[in-house]
Image (cartoon, rainbow, N blue to C red):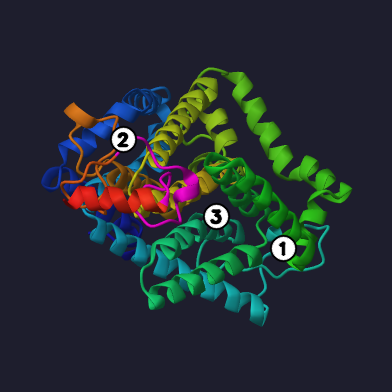
């Protein structure tokens, strides 16, 4: 019989497997599957194929290799849930509302911890700093909590922008404020910088002047908010760099690099270094960078294939998002991709994908974003085109050219390049 501890460790994985299997077997959508495969077929084949090969590279330690494979690949099944189970706008919004409500609750708990002065372990504070107060809520650490907030803060902003009711706008405004406060109080520099850089990329993709304005806002926030100013100043202090080089992140990254040098092409093997599995089976320490961990475990080939997959994913999502004509879909998917990008950037300085719920959330939102962007298209006819906006009345011709970023906040279905008199005349003729 399975013990309670075993069941506690397996229930979430079993639930994920059942939901993913149900999505694939009973809710399979050929259009969405073709969209996913058209975009990520070879990156996925190569990345998953490498993982399968690693299972057999160190047969005496197969248990460690299998556990390492599970930690890397299993949570990608969540993408199938997001892709197939939520097949219309209403169900997608309900899922995002649920996830946002949980994230907002986590933010409230974290803010409460900071207010009452809950102590955190010394390992989560820098020796160069005098404070030991950091929000971490009910997740693993302040840094993971910060990444969690960085993922959902832009999503709250997107839902706020497309909300059509006063109560909805009030709720999403409060949620956005609480998530932002939780992010700041986590004191996670990596999460701050990841979200800031992701937001700048988003602003630059929309219009360059937005990126310049946003940069000014970030500089101002750094100057006027004490927790941010204190942590950023600590980052550039000699004490921080000395500690980081001796037994901190830089030292761990250097050791991971040297581990890779013993087998530069294929590394030490999945589950053999730098994460929870490596610590459990071989006593290795955390690397504090998912990409350096990947480098040590799978070598240059593995890191290259992982980056190939992630960059291909981001480029495809951005291209499809920016070509959207449906205003609500465009704004919401911009916010989703911004959050996903923040998590990927944070992985450079943290093992965020080592945390099961963050790994699952990432791939769930990837699948949901694909579902929203390619919903209702015929891949054989219009695979590279956008589906007609649901806001456009049937029977009206709609231009195939994508809307400009500057028109995001304008009402859908309106030609913003025509003068008002011409628009009125066109409407009259259209209904004649």
> Can you tell which of label 2 and label 3 is closer to the viewer?
2
356 or 158: nearer the eye? 158
Residues under labels 2 and 3: Cα distance? 37 Å
Along the line of sight, which residue is nearer the eye, 88 or 1?
88
**Pointer 1 local density, CA inside 10 Å: few below 14, some 14–19, many at least 20:** few
Q: Earlier in the sequence, mark 3 or mark 1?
A: 1
| Camera sees residue 279 | no
Q: Residue at x 50, y 57 (%)?
A: 154
Residue 238 locus on image (x, y percent): 88, 47
Image location (x, y in percent) of residue 68: 43, 38
3D distance between C-alphas at marks 2 and 1: 57 Å
36 inside magenta stretch: no
Q: Earlier in the sequence, mark 2 or mark 3?
A: 3
- Confirm whether the magenta stretch covers residue 401: yes
Identify the residue under disc 2: 400
Q: As displayed, is residue 417 above or below residue 15?
A: above
**Residue lying at 55% horizontally and 55% vertically, measured from the top left:** 147
Closer to the chain start, of discs 2 and 1, is 1
Question: Can you identify the residue that label 1 sits on?
Answer: 122
The residue range painted magenta reads: 399-419
Query: Residue 320's quadrant in the figure?
Result: top left
Q: Secondary structure at mark 1?
A: helix
Q: Secondary structure at mark 2?
A: loop
Circle 3 is placed at which residue position? 147
Residue found at the very far right of the displayed protein: 238
How far separated are the C-alphas under marks 3 and 1? 20 Å
Asked if marks 3 and 1 touch (Cβ < 8 Å), the reply is: no
């Amino acid at each position: 019989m399975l013990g309670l501890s075993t069941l506690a460790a397996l229930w979430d994985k079993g639930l994920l497997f059942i939901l993913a299997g149900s999505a694939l077997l009973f809710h399979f959508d050929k259009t969405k599957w073709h969209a996913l495969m058209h975009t990520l077929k070879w990156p996925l084949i190569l990345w998953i194929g490498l993982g399968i090969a690693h299972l057999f590279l160190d047969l005496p330690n197969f248990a460690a290799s299998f556990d390492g494979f599970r930690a890397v690949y299993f949570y990608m099944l969540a993408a199938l849930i997001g892709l197939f189970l939520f097949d219309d706008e209403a169900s997608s919004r309900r899922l995002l509302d649920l996830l946002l409500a949980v994230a907002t609750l986590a933010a409230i708990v974290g803010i409460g911890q900071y207010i009452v002065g809950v102590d955190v372990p010394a390992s989560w504070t820098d020796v160069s700093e005098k404070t030991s107060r950091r929000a971490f809520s009910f997740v693993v650490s302040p840094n993971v909590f910060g990444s969690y907030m960085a993922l959902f803060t832009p999503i709250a902003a997107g839902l706020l922008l497309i909300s059509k009711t006063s109560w909805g706008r009030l709720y999403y405004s409060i949620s956005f404020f609480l998530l932002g406060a939780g992010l700041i109080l986590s004191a996670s520099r990596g999460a701050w910088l990841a979200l800031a850089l992701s937001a700048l990329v988003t602003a630059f993709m929309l219009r360059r002047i937005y990126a310049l304005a946003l940069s000014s806002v970030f500089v101002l926030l750094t100057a006027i908010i004490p927790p941010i100013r204190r942590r950023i100043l600590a980052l550039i202090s000699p004490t921080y760099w000395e500690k980081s080089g001796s037994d901190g992140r830089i030292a761990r990254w250097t050791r991971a690099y040297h581990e890779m040098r013993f087998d530069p092409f294929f590394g030490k093997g999945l589950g053999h270094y730098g994460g929870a599995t490596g610590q459990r089976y071989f006593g290795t320490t955390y690397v504090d960078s998912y990409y350096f961990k990947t480098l040590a475990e799978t070598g240059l080939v593995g890191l290259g294939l992982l980056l190939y997959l992630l960059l291909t994913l981001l480029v495809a999502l951005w291209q499809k998002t920016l070509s959207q004509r449906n205003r609500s879909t465009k704004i919401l998917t911009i916010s989703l991709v911004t959050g996903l990008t923040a998590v990927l950037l944070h992985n450079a300085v943290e093992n965020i994908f080592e945390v099961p719920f963050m790994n699952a959330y990432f791939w769930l939102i990837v699948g949901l974003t694909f579902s929203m962007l390619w919903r209702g298209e015929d891949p054989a006819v219009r695979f590279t085109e956008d589906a007609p906006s649901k806001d456009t009345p049937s029977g009206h011709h709609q231009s195939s050219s994508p809307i400009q970023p500057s028109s995001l906040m304008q009402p859908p279905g309106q030609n913003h390049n025509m003068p008002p008199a011409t628009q009125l005349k066109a409407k009259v003729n259209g209904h004649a």
